[in-house]
Amino acid sequence: MSDENNLWNPLEFESVTTPKAILSEQASYLTKMTKNVLRARIRAGTNPKNLVFNFEIIAPSLNNYVLVVCSVSHDLVKWYPLTLVSHPSGEIIKCEDEAEFINKLKEELNRKDVIEAIKSLFAQSRS
Amino acid sequence: MDEIIAKAVKEKDIDILVIVEPHEFPTNLLLTLNSEGNDFYYNADSCSHVQIFSKFIDPQFSLIQEFDRTVGWKYRSPYGDSLNIIVTHFHDKFHNDEEDQDVKLDELIKEIQIIEDSSDIDKTLLIGDLNIDPYNRLCYGPKGLNSIMCRKTVKRLGERKGRKLFYNASWNLLGDKDHTPGTYYRTSAGTKYWSVLDQIMMRSGLIDQFDPSSIRVLNYIFEEALVSINDIPRSEKYSDHLPIYFEIKI
């Protein structure tokens, strides 16, 4: 196929940190910290207006039990402000920029009820 | 037990570990496998007769179908090749007479068919505790697993009476030339003492990727003997079955 028919202007793809990449990095850390006993993953949701990503923790030894910790929703093109939804509390948190998102995500992942749930899943995976 | 399994995995650089008829919850073995790293995952399914641990997770290693005693997984190589891995724990002859085993083998054959039909890959590996020997008619017979000893015949014919053949690599484990004469030993008058109940079979398309020189019964792991001085499995310490190791290049 000859490029002479190509109507596109040159496309340049910048290296950027997406909200999904931030979530994925934290998912990898949790999987590593639990020696793969628990696995965290990011699953894309199905909202037609926005991109939605769920932060899920899976316990393979407990018949693949899934705990959804939080969800992130943002516009396809304009990632910020984004919406962070806390699943334990149902609270909807607006994050204006990446720094705020990282701060709020840290708070969300370290919620007392989330940590207790992770500890419980780990303990029950061993029993 | 977990320690010796983890040693074997490390010594042999194993990618996929299959435990049939497990007696332990999988997490402690997973933690032992990962004591020096995070290489292994427990590939969970609801089949209580089988546990699979591997260096792969979904989508590279994904569940196809699960049944009470049989489970089918699909491995996809990053380089494009794939295979179905079916693991089973077939009913033993101590709790099932010949007629029972006949009926239950029909169920296993249907389950294998369902798994293969659910997959887009024609390379299938069947492994597990079959609780029958390779020379049992349920193994080699055309109404059985249709699983024979010759690679060339399986590659040449592909099928028999309209059903796909398996190449049964477990024939290589019979006899005492290079190793213990089987994977299971039973002391009882009138028996043959040794059996190869733990078997490895594959469809024609996978044969060239199997290294026949690799298949062996493990009776030592590092310096630790899994067998007594008479080569009998140390069932009181480990298992009444000896493990099998083999290589598939994919």
Image: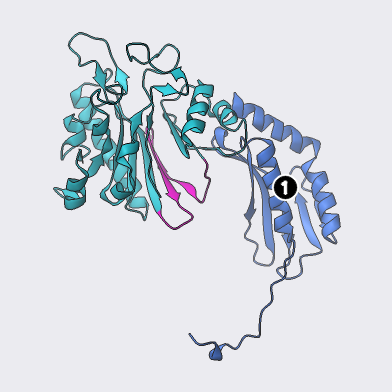
Chain colours: A blue, B cyan
A14 left or right, relative to B190: right
**Which subunit holds the residue at mark 1?**
A
Give coordinates of residue B71: x percent, y percent. Answer: 39, 38
* Residue at 62% in and 30% down: B35
Taking depth in this image into account, of A104 and B192 the one nearest to the observer is B192
Q: Residue B29, position in %: x, y? A: 54, 27
Let me know if residue A127 appears in the view.
Answer: yes
> Please, what is the three-letter code of the amino acid marked with disc 1?
Gln
Which structural element holds mark 1? helix
Residue B55 x, y percent position in the rendering: 52, 42
User: Could one spot residue A69 in this view of the protein?
Assistant: no
Q: Report the magenta residues as a range.
A: B55-81
Residue at left offset 38%, top offset 47%: B84
Residue lying farthest to the left in this orientation: B161
Q: Is residue B71 magenta?
A: yes
Seen in the picture, residue B168 relative to B232 is either above or below; the reply is below
- Residue B143 or B80: which is nearer the viewer? B80
Query: Which residue is located at x 16 percent, y 36 percent?
Result: B141
Return the residue at label 1: A26
- Relative to B106, residue B118 above or below: below
Occupied quadrant, residue B185: top left
Residue B98: x and y in percent read 19, 24
Q: Magenta stretch: residue A77 in it? A: no
Which quarter of the picture shows residue A67? top right
